[in-house]
Each structure stands twice: as C-alpha cells, then as structure tokens.
Amino acid sequence: MEKKRYNNIGRGEFLARLGAGSALTVAALAGCKPSTAKFDPYAVDDEDVPTDKMEYRTNPRTGDKVSILGYGCMRWPMRKGDDGRDELDQEKINELVDYAIAHGVNYFDTSPVYCQGKSEQVTGIALSRHARDKFLIATKMSNFSNYSRENSILMYNRSFEMLQVDTIDYYLLHNIGSDIRSFEARFIDNGILDFLIEERAKGKIRNLGWSFHGSKEVFDHILAYHDKVHWDFIQIQMNYSDWHNARGRNVNAEYLYAELEKRNIPVVIMEPLLGGRLSNVPNHISARLQQQEPERSVASWAFRFVGSYPMVLTALSGMTYEEHLQDNIRTYAPFEPLSEEDKKFLFETAELMLQYPTIPCNDCKYCMPCPYGLDIPAILLHYNKCVNEGNLSRSSQDENFRKARRAFLVGYDRAVEKERQADRCVGCKQCNEHCPQRIDIPRQLRRIDKYIEDLKQGREF
C-alpha cells in the first residue's frame, strides 16, 4: 500500500502542489500553537551565545545591514502529525526564528518549493510575529515545471501572500545553470525578467538576483545581463572544498566569486557546509581540524572561510536544530576572519577529503518525489555517513569488516524504509535533470545496491 501511495503522484503534480497549488492555507497553519514559556529566546542563560555581537555586512545598493549568518529555510524541523505522518513543526520553527532574531540573525531565505511547498507559509507565520524591520526576507521564482507567464506571476504573487509581506527584500531567479535555453524559456521568452525589473522599480522587490548551479558558460551568459538588469546580488555555492575542487558540473567557487567581485556585486553564499558534508567529515579530518583549533567546531571552519571574503553579504545555513543555530552564532558573533595560512590549511584539508568517495548530495530534495517511491536523499546520505564514520569496507578481509557490515546494513534499514531502498530503482533518470549537483543518481543507486548485496552475501568487492 505504501509504495502505491508514493507512485500516485508525479513530478508535475508535485511541483504544482509546491507552487500555486499548495493545499495548506495560511489560516490553517496559523492555528499552530505559539511558542510557550518553556523557551524564551530573550532570556538566554548561555553566556557563550552572545545577543549583541553579530557581524553585519552593508548592502552597497540599499544600505541594508545584513547579518553574515543567514537562515536557510529549506530544512525546517518536522514532527509526527495526528495521522502519523511527518509535518512541519510550526511551534519549533517559531522558537528557532525567535532565537535567531534575538541573537542578531535577520536574513531568512526560502522558496515556493522548499519543504514540499510549505516553507514560505511556515516561515511567514514565524516572521509575522516580529516587527517588519527585524528581518529581511528572500524568496525565489521557482518556476521549474510550468514556466508560463501566467503561472510564474501567480507563483510570484502567492509568495507575498504566504510570507505575509508587502515587499520582498531579496528576490531570486531560482537554480539557474542547467543550460542557456532553459534560462531563456523560464525568464526571457515569457517576459518574466522584464516583469520582475518593473516590480523592482515599483518597490515590490528591493533587490533582484539569481541563484546558480551549473556550467561556466551559463554563468557567464547570465552575468552578461548585468549591463541591462544591474543585478543587486547573486547567490552561489561556495565553500573551501568547492573553491578549487568543485565536483560534477559545478564551477570552482574561486572563479565565481572573482567574477562577481570584479563587478562589485554582493554575494550570498549557499552550501557553506556542502549540505552538511563539511561538518560530518571523516574522523581523521575532524581530528585534524580540532587539533588546529580545539575550542572550535568542525563546522565553524567552513563558516569562517566564506565570511573571510569581503563581498559576501550573508552565508546561508539550514539550521534544523537549536544547537546548530547556537554554534553558528558563536562563529559569527563576533567574527574572526581566517588568515592566509588558515585558508591554505583548509585547502590542504579539502585535498585530503577528496580521497574519500562521498556522493555530493546536499539533501536539497529536488530529486523528489521519485515516481517509484525511493527515498533518494536518505539512501545517499546514509552511504556518505558510513564513509565518514569508517564503516565502508573494501574487502571482507578488512579487520573491521563485521562491525562495518553490521553498521551499514542495520543503519540502512533504520534510515530508509524497505519499500524505498535502492533496489527499487528502475533507472528512469527522471531525478537526474533536477539535481543541482549533477549527480547521476540511478548510477549511484545501482552502485550502492550492489555494495549492499555484496555485504549481505559476504562477497569480495
């Protein structure tokens, strides 16, 4: 029954629900309980989480004072609903937003397609409880499936309704980079870019930019529109691993940042932790970083790296848990930039990490839903977790084979439901075109499934 339920929704329907067709209403979500007295973000006892030392960067166009730590609203916490299904935890989201604002975070980044189409709604509810001058909101034109002018404008207008605002501070053309023709179809041929420029002139949009995953050719092509559009900011994937060693079809961040710096275009950073992979590093890498700075977290290195570049306006982090939020606040409040020696140390660390065969999945869930019910991100993330923890055996003769075998197989069954595991992949490749990291997902799933079968059978690898 479970598999049939997953198979009944196609990607077109899924994206329609995420955009203009979302079933939930603001009124329905507004009925969630408000924050309770058990959590008061303005009465924090932790002296090492300061409320008044956040680093801010000034937007040269608008004069906005932007917290260098931005809140990415793609991975909000979940809870079990009354029907037993996972749902967004509005009460916890309210608490996280309250805590972030109390500690100086003022930039919140969402999209019509995040959190199965509900991120804008729950983010809007949480932020609406604060004065409008306490936060800057960023959202996107995520018209991937239906990019007609009518549907795109409907999506744009719906964002104001969901976020409960009259102006959007930072508006992005979402996930550009797959090819030039796709960009032109989504934004040029239908007149949507001209429409958004007009909306900026009216003051409905305060800053207009775009987010990028893709090839150098596409990046250069869209950047050339700067003479016409005067892009106010651009969002790129940047971290110390991608600076020189971007994987797949992504472009080295060193090049992207340099091109934006030449034009004095402010930069918003996504994936400073590579979807968590730069915080969940292999054990020997973690030891190397902590030996260098024993009192700092592994993640703090990645955030200090991106913050050390002056054109960076804010660095986004999808902070699902309060402890992640606290650690990142400590990193940026106050902020201590990296020295050139520190950067060199991180680049050497990145080279060491390349020796470990993790899959570049950032858990963005753009590949979902799978028409055959697979939980693609959970499969890939479990594999990466086992790599980082040293539980990926290369031979049954390995000293820790039995321990690693058990850890992988037992953990796999706990992380991924039986009917959603890699053996169900039929290789349809529908997921590939939506992956911003350009992972050949069916190929990776076949590889993982074969590894699992070899583990079960005790065969050599």
Image: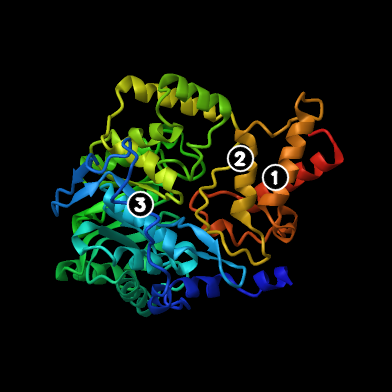
Q: In terms of secondary structure, where does tag 1 sit? A: helix
Q: Is residue 19 visible?
A: yes
Q: Who's the residue at 28% across and 53% down the image?
A: 101
Q: As shown in the figure, which amino acid type bears the numbered disc 2? A: Lys
Sequence-wise first label, 1 or 2: 2
Q: As shown in the figure, which amino acid type bears the numbered disc 1? A: Gly
Sequence-wise first label, 3 or 2: 3
**Residue on which disc 3 sits:** 71
- The disc placed on residue 320 is none
**Residue on which disc 2 sits:** 385
- The disc placed on residue 411 is 1
Q: Where does residue 214 sit, x and y in percent of width and height?
A: 43, 50
Q: Is residue 28 above or below residue 61?
A: below
Q: As shown in the figure, which amino acid type bears the numbered disc 3? A: Tyr
Disc tally is 3
Q: In terms of secondary structure, where does tag 3 sit? A: strand
Q: In terms of secondary structure, where does tag 2 sit? A: helix
Sequence-wise first label, 3 or 1: 3
Q: Where does residue 460 sit, x and y in percent of width and height?
A: 82, 33
Residue 39 found in image quarter? bottom left
**Label 1 – label 2 distance at C-alpha:** 10 Å
**Label 3 – label 1 distance at C-alpha:** 30 Å
Q: Is residue 271 left or right of residue 68?
A: right
Q: Is residue 427 left or right of residue 293?
A: right
Q: Where does residue 10 sit, x and y in percent of width and height?
A: 59, 72
Q: Who's the residue at 38% across and 22% down the image?
A: 344
Q: Is residue 223 visible?
A: no
